[in-house]
Amino acid sequence: MAKHRIISLILIVVVVLIGYFVYASQFTAGSYFSKFPFRLGLDLNGGTQLTYRADITKISSENLAGSMSSLRDVIERRVNIFGVSEPIVQTIDASAFSGVTEHRLVVELPGVTDIDKAVEMIGRTPVLEFKLMKKGLTEADFLKASTTLNELFIETGLTGRLLSSSQLEFNQQTGEPIVGLIFNSEGKELFAKITRENVGSVLSIFLDGAAISSPVIREEIGEGRAQISGNFTPQEAKTLVRDLNYGALPVPVELVGTQTIGASLGQGALVASVQAGFIGFLILIAFMILWYRLPGVISALALVIYVIISLALFKLIPVTLTSAGLAGFILSIGMAVDANVLIFERMKEELKKGEKIDQAMKEGFHRAWLSIRDSNISSLITSAVLFWVGTSAVKGFALTLGIGVVVSMLTAITISRTFLFAVSMKKENRLTRFLFSNGMHV
Amino acid sequence: MFIIKFRALFFTLSAVFVGLAITAMVVWGFNFGIDFKGGSILEVVYPSERPSAEVLKVEIEKLALGSYTLQPVGDKNYVVRTKELSNTEKESLIGIMKMGGSVDIAQFNSIGPVVGNELKNKSYVAIGIVLIGIVLFVTFAFRKVSKPVSSWKYGLATIVALAHDVVVPAGAYITWIAFRGGEIDLLFLTALLAILGYSVRDTIVVFDRVRENLRVNKDMGVKESFDETVGKSVSQTFGRSINTSLTIFLVLLALYVWGAESTRNFSFVLLVGIIAGTYSSIFLASPLLVLFEKIQKKA
């Protein structure tokens, strides 16, 4: 008993510290803890989510993972240049497991509510390709409308993917703006090989599917540098250099879904959800205390601890809170006391049988454990499946629910148990037995 | 015992509820939203007077976007639903909604049909997995109870109760949105899965008690008919079944009344779900066990 009291005190101190952390990280600007604010999803913060389909038809399977990953990096770099706070750029691979049929890229931009601006930020994909013109072609071949590019050109595999950087240069004699290209080591080798093997051929430079320059290869170029002079205006050259430097997208992408939530709609949802959660919490505590008396007070305390620990976890993991996620948290508060209900009802049965308070408590916890464990496992199954299905809104719900179930097992069992044993009374009389029973009759 | 004695009545009641739900589904159909069908939703807020729907409709028709719906929301908003819009089409639509003035875009969602279809398929699979997973788990958890009813029958009773818990709220929701507006969206699916997750908790509590009473009877050499055991278990756990559901009901009520507009339909489904779930745990799942035992005895 004494040991329970000591542990209870330690628990209370620890929880107060955690509670302070939750408070300070949210409301005290400039403190060390401000690094851990609550992360709010788009539907609470306002923002835009863009879903792109990645066109992987030209990528071989061994390059696939690498290409998707560099696509992700490239887009993230661009988004970061525009100073969007905490953007999320994610690739979703097509697979039987994920249930998704195409490779996708999802970009979340909190706080950006102008979709056009967002799409522009991502930028168009300057798809840069070098193609060798076939030998022996006549002008007629070019002019025939039905000729396809493949009949005129050979792919070389030298694309923007192999570009290291691009810079704006000016022709020394004419002052004409040119775009200088510097390839990475793989590109350098490939470029050297192409130029070595095809001296005298035309190597056309295609930008977004249109040939912008078709120089003749005069010699092997080993330094991995090239220049594109395509009658650019200075502005055009600058834009092209910028786009190429953003990283020519290794994989072309196409927009297949957008979602924008205005900030005020998001703010309203946030306030309402927090309000509902708080009111629900109070109603629940009132019910537990009124119905379950002294153990009810203990369970109310355990519930407060549950909320504090959950909030701290949401900050630390971190969990991005959406309105569905907040609903999941509120639901989990209702489920958190279930374990307590089962334990206390069992206690009442034992008290009725004539057991001493101490013994009734022990039996209550012992017997109720199986039901608690089994019910929570089924809820966890649901959370896991929901997490798999989900877009970010649903994932948020699955996470808060799942975390809630796990944390509530801790608070409802371990913590309640400690507190309950700490207040357990040796004196057995009608009053104390009343305090530990519940419901409409002793 | 009352519950077991009058199980025919409760089975009939369940059948009636399920029948009503299915009728609702047939009558009003499944109004899939853009999450599953693909399409666009545009919601705009007008700073002052919002124009009349008729005027807007005339202009929207001119865009030839195909079938669409225009719905007023609250005092200052309109929601337009169309097929998936290209950027230029979206701009034209916003231009029309501005009516020469200005609007705030509260939200705009556009989802391609491939994404939508995928989500639909994923959803069916998800429901299937959760149902099977829970049933397998219950069968496993009760594997040591084989007399007089084998453990898989506990799983079977659970699945019937869960099916009831999914169909009834779905029917209620379809009725609800038929009158109030709304559609079958991802949140609805989430609610259904959440219901499956928490309504089985109740059922497990009762089954657990049945298991314990059977064991105690065996240990003490007490002979008791199965329906008496089940009846006793139900009355013993009645209080806690109600209370565990009540706590969830109370928070869901708070969510419904004070929560965000975007989660209102969501909390409605969850509320119906908790009521249906409690009913099925007490009045459906346990009487089913008794029914199975009787069928078994006849065989």
Image: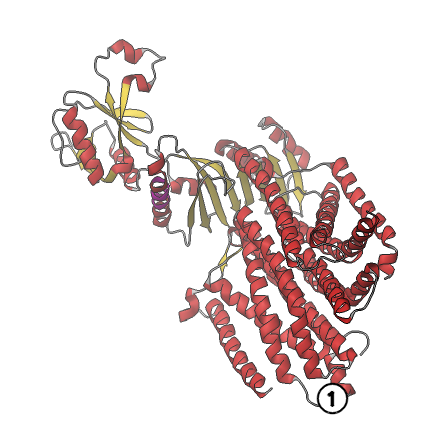
What amino acid is found at the position of numbered circle 1 in the picture? Glu
Task: Report whether A252 appears left or right of B152.
Answer: left
> Which contiguous range is marked in magenta?
A67-74
Q: Residue A231 placed where, x, y %?
A: 23, 27
Please name whichever residue, A18 or B213, is drawn nearer the observer in this view of the structure: B213
Task: Report whether B86 appears left or right of A151.
Answer: right
Q: Quadrant of the N terminus of chain B?
A: bottom right
Measured along the vertical axis of the image, is residue A10 above or below residue B61? below
Q: Quadrant of residue A128?
A: top left
**Dot 1: element:** loop
Q: Residue at x 84, y 57 (%)?
A: B4
Q: Residue A130 placed where, x, y %?
A: 25, 28
Chain identity of mark 1: A
Visible in this render: residue A118? yes
Q: How is the image coloured?
A: secondary structure
- For label 1, the residue is A428
Measured along the vertical axis of the image, is residue B118 above or below residue A434? above
* Main secondary structure type of the part rendered in magenta: helix
Residue placed furthest toward the bottom: A427
Q: Residue A39 placed where, x, y %?
A: 48, 58
Q: Is residue A18 magenta?
A: no
